[in-house]
Image (spheres, coloured by chain):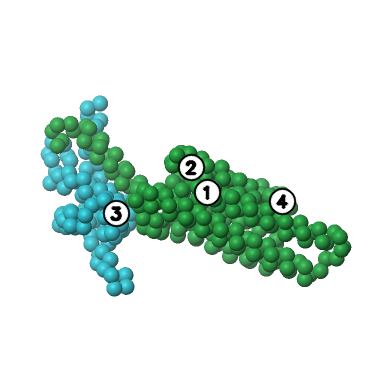
Chain colours: A green, B cyan
């Protein structure tokens, strides 16, 4: 084997080693369409949130009343919108990635995806707990920036375990979150830009690069 | 084991054994099924190569259970890491040598 074409087989071997190392450490079935789906869900969610807020301030302006009861209702409505948006985004993006893995003949739930999930979950749970803590002190203005920053950190962390391009999405989310920190009144807009628009842009680029 | 001229390790002449070592260099441990899936080989074929690597002292085997199912995991040994690194160096040298 080595006698015939030593350099060619050596090169083949090295390429093989590299490919297997990559494949065994990164979850490569993550679909770009998952990003697009999550982005669409986020935009719909943001619009629903916008309508809820609009209603709230609309009735406040017409009646001139501002009761604590209304405000606690608003909080519940916004939380429900948020949770539904998250669930819809999660299910649709999971489905699209599952479909891609199936087409590639790869398992969705192997050691690479488990590792990816774990490395996403740690910063996300931390962020979730942090935000719940902030809400105890009514720091509503900073919910959107905190979501963006923690999500961005989760993505940067996860980029070591999946397609590395996701790192750039993470950087963008972090920058948006920090900008939102300086203009805290526009949380919903920043939130829609980060979770909606950026996801759609990223997902489209990934889809064109790896799946088209 | 080593070819005196090229420095290549005979054990790693097999694509499957080379694959197993590549996986174990970058994963602390991996179980039989994940390995089978990654390398796209049959049970029997993979088992034979794993025994060979174990006999050479390049990998460690750990048998455990998940519920009632057996779960065998594999890890690389120090000797395995060293042998693999030398093999890669030899491969690189062969490429450079001709340039």
Figure check: A204 above or below A124: above
Residue A8: % across, % down: 22, 32
Under circle 2, the secondary element is: helix
Q: Chain of mark 1?
A: A
Distance of label 3 from label 4 (alpha carbons)? 48 Å
> For the point 32% across and 73% down, which residue is it?
B67
Q: Nearer the viewer, mark 1 or mark 4?
A: 1
Query: Is residue B51 visible to the viewer in this orientation of the structure?
Result: yes
Residue A50: % across, % down: 71, 55
Q: Earlier in the sequence, mark 4 or mark 2?
A: 4
Q: Say the numbered circle drawn on residue A204.
A: none
| Label pair 4/2, CB-CB below 8 angstroms | no
| Label pair 3/1, CB-CB below 8 angstroms | no
Under circle 3, the secondary element is: helix
Distance of label 1 from label 2 (alpha carbons)? 9 Å
- Find disc 4 in the rendering and name its residue: A186
- Find disc 2 in the rendering and name its residue: A206
Residue A203: % across, % down: 52, 45
- Find disc 3 in the rendering and name its residue: B37
Distance of label 2 from label 3 (alpha carbons)? 25 Å
Q: Earlier in the sequence, mark 1 or mark 4?
A: 1
Distance of label 1 from label 4 (alpha carbons)? 23 Å
Q: Chain of mark 3?
A: B
Q: Chain of mark 4?
A: A
Other-residue count near label 3 (Cα within 10 Å), few / some / many at <14 / 14–19 / ≥20: some
> For the point 68% across and 56% down, which residue is it?
A48
Q: Chain of mark 2?
A: A
Distance of label 4 from label 2 (alpha carbons)? 29 Å
| Label pair 1/2, CB-CB below 8 angstroms | yes
Q: Quadrant location of the N terminus of chain A?
A: top left
Side of A210 where A62 appears, left or right: right
Which quadrant of the view contains residue A198?
A: top right
């Amino acid at each position: 084997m080595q006698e015939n074409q030593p350099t060619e087989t050596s090169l083949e071997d090295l390429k093989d080693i590299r490919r297997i190392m990559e494949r065994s450490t990164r979850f490569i079935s993550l679909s770009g369409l998952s990003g697009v789906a999550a982005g669409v869900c986020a935009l719909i969610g943001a619009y629903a949130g916008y309508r809820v807020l609009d209603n709230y301030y609309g009735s406040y302006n017409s009646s001139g009343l501002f009761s604590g009861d209304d405000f606690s209702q608003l909080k519940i409505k916004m939380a429900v919108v948020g949770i539904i948006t998250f669930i819809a985004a999660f299910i649709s993006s999971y489905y699209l990635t599952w479909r891609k893995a199936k087409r590639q003949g790869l398992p969705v739930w192997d050691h690479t995806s488990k590792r990816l999930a774990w490395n996403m979950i740690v910063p996300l749970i931390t962020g979730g707990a942090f935000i719940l803590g902030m809400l105890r002190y009514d720091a509503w203005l900073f919910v959107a920036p905190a979501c963006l920053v923690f999500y961005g950190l989760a993505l940067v962390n996860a980029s070591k375990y999946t397609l590395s391009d996701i790192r750039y999405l993470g950087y963008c989310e972090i920058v948006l979150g920090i900008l939102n920190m300086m203009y805290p009144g526009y949380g919903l807009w920043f939130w829609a830009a980060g979770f909606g628009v950026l996801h759609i842009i990223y997902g489209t680029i990934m889809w064109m690069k790896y799946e088209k | 084991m080593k070819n005196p001229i090229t420095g290549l390790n005979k054990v790693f002449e097999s694509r499957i054994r080379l694959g197993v070592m590549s996986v174990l260099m970058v994963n602390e441990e991996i179980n039989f099924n994940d390995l089978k899936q990654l390398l796209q080989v049959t049970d029997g074929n993979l088992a034979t190569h794993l025994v060979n690597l174990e006999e050479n002292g390049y990998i460690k085997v750990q048998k455990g259970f998940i519920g009632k199912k057996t779960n065998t995991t594999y890890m690389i040994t120090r000797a395995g890491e060293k042998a693999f690194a030398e093999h890669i160096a030899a491969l690189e040298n062969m490429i450079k040598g001709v340039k």
